[in-house]
Amino acid sequence: MTALQEKPKAVAPEGPPPRRRGKRATALAGTDKLVLGLMLGIPTIVHVLFVWIPTLGSIALSFSRWNGIGGFEDIEWIGVENYTEIFTEYPRFWPAVQHNLIWLVFLLVVPTCAGLLLAVLLDRELRFSRIYQSALYMPMVLSLALIGFIWQLIYTPDGGLLNSLLGLGDKPVDWIGDSDINLYAVLVAAAWRHTGYIMLLYLAGLKSVDPALKEAAALDGASSTQTFFRVTFPVMKPVNIVVAVVTVIEALRAFDIVYVINKGRNGLELLSVLVTDNIIGEASRIGRGSAVAVILLTISLGVIIPYLYQTFSKENRS
Amino acid sequence: MTATLERPSAPVSSKKRTVTPARVALHAFLILTCLMTLAPLLWAVYASLRTYDDTSVNGYFSIAKSLTLENFAKAWDVGDLPHFYWNTFLITIPALLLTLLLSSMVAFGVSRFSFKFNLLLLMIFTAGNLLPQQVIVTPLWRLYRLIEVPEWISASGSLIDSQLGVILIHIAFQSGFCTFVLSNYMKTIPYELTEAARVDGASVFRQYWQLTLPLCRPVLAALATLEFTWIYNDFLWALVLIQDGDKMPVTSALQNLKGTFFTDNNLIAAGSLLVALPTLVVFFVLQRQFVGGLTLGSTKG
């Protein structure tokens, strides 16, 4: 992150670097105070009301039994029963956890390596570099729901591209219907989109690495591979953190593509599907759904908090 | 930011380019990778241009007997796409404009003035934008039933099943990302500028509207491009918060197309491409903004 943010400084409107804040003595006039209060207050209220209050709501509801339709007086408080049920009895929970984990590991390995490799290849004077980049970024603008539709044309056993290419026309593999393999088929499609994003992040990261570092390493006799792994990659730590955060969050958010394909059943269960099923599916068990949401929240805070720390601790010090 | 938005540096003089086997291999590898990346979309284009009769007899993996735009016309009519595009437009444009307005106000406040809770405020917005949507969706869905709005805004009398509700959650959710990016950018604007304006008697609002915002034009353009594709591509919020299929935006309405078109994959391909078209156009026309915005923020998927 830091590396990415250092760029603006170099090209900020002319003038000395911004002064340290906190040294402004000028008092604000009454109207100005009010205007500033509104400018900060209104967006904050909107954000907190629709994002953070519901987050707290999920935590509260996870200790309840409720169908969500009736009034609040129907809420029955049952302590941690939802959690014990989820961990011990709920048949779809552990498969969903497993699928989310596979999703995460797959995204951390395949698109990250591919994106890094492509970024390294493109980070040089290269003819047609812009065209290559455009082609590789393109999947990023498509929604995952749409990608679900487009990839079904490839996977369908009914004359799909993949079966035809593999010469399986007679005994077609049902890439999406077979619960042993459909998760990986979907992951390939998700990785297709994710790779361009990772490449973009690493390209920006590579550009921000001081060339003098590489030159120094070369002078010391390091090969280009050594320079990359011993110098460039460690210097890109902030980018690596952003990539890790983005990938974890992406893995936890995964929903659209499986919902479009089969509503997240038959091998494609995900934690996000278990939550959503309670409001648009048949389950209608708000308490249990909220408990799954809290589990999602806990995992995501595991990356959000370190990320906030690394992003903002620097500012605290200045 | 600006650095990434700038035009690529001037082409290297051709003298420097010597053809080596390594270069050829590199280009071959990159061309192959690009073709594989474009393949799924090109395959959809190919399928969409063929008739159902053709592919049902010969399969999809065959040379087309004839190419036609019929599927697009049919998807347009059967899927009632103009209607759903309009729904998307009604949601995307207000959500986009208000997100940029509100987040630029917060960013201005936290980057130009110092309070005790400056950092806390910024952290709340940044963290909010990283939450998985499912963490908030259940209580939100219930909250929307409680918030009453006049009938002329929503026939249900509450925020549920109304486009306003979807707009509001987009604003609330997306303002996290935009605030983060904008405040980082505004911090790079010299403090002397606003101070000079203040000494000259400019009100806080003028410092924001007439001084800071114009300087933020490049980053606002980048964010607008990004937010357009994200809000356009939204699937979950509309799916959960809108029950009346008639009010769905076009991305979520894709679900309907699937039902309507049943097994006609050619028609689905044409419909999907039509839905993808606006984002693809934005991407090819405003690619620099798109890439610049992502490089700057880089906390979204």
Image: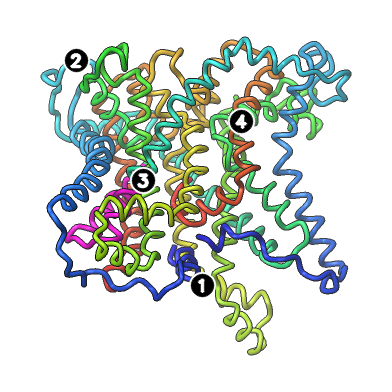
Indicate the position of residue B190 as horizontal and vertical percent values: 37, 68
Q: Is mark 1 on a helix, strand or loop?
A: helix
Q: Which residue is drawn at 31% across and 43% down?
A: A297
Tell me the chain of label 1.
A
Q: Are marks 1 and 4 in contact (CB under 8 Å)?
A: no
Q: Mark 1 points at which residue?
A: A234
Q: In which quarter of the image is residue A307?
A: bottom left
Q: Give the range drawn in magenta.
A: B103-131
Q: Do the residues labelled 3 and 4 touch (CB within 8 Å)?
A: no
**How far apart in space, not on screen, are marks 3 and 4 (Cα)?**
25 Å
Query: Is B236 located above or below residue B195 in the figure?
Result: above
Q: Name the residue under label 3.
A: B129
Q: Name the residue under label 2.
A: A70
Q: What element carries label 4?
A: helix
Q: Are marks 2 and 1 in contact (CB under 8 Å)?
A: no
Q: Mark 4 points at which residue?
A: B276
| Neighbour tally class for label 1: few under 14, some 14-19, many 20 plus, Cα within 10 Å | few
Main SS of residues in magenta = helix
Position of residue B221 in the picture relative to residue A29 (left or right): right
Tell me the chain of label 4.
B
| Neighbour tally class for label 4: few under 14, some 14-19, many 20 plus, Cα within 10 Å | many
In front: label 2 or label 4:
4
**How far apart in space, not on screen, are marks 2 and 4 (Cα)?**
39 Å
- Amino acid type shown at disc 1: Pro
Q: Residue at x 75, y 63 (%)?
A: A126
Name of the residue lying farthest toward the bottom? A220
**How far apart in space, not on screen, are marks 1 and 4 (Cα)?**
38 Å
Position of residue A244 in the picture relative to residue A84 (left or right): right
Q: Magenta stretch containing residue B115, yes or no?
A: yes
Indicate the position of residue B276 as horizontal and vertical percent values: 61, 30
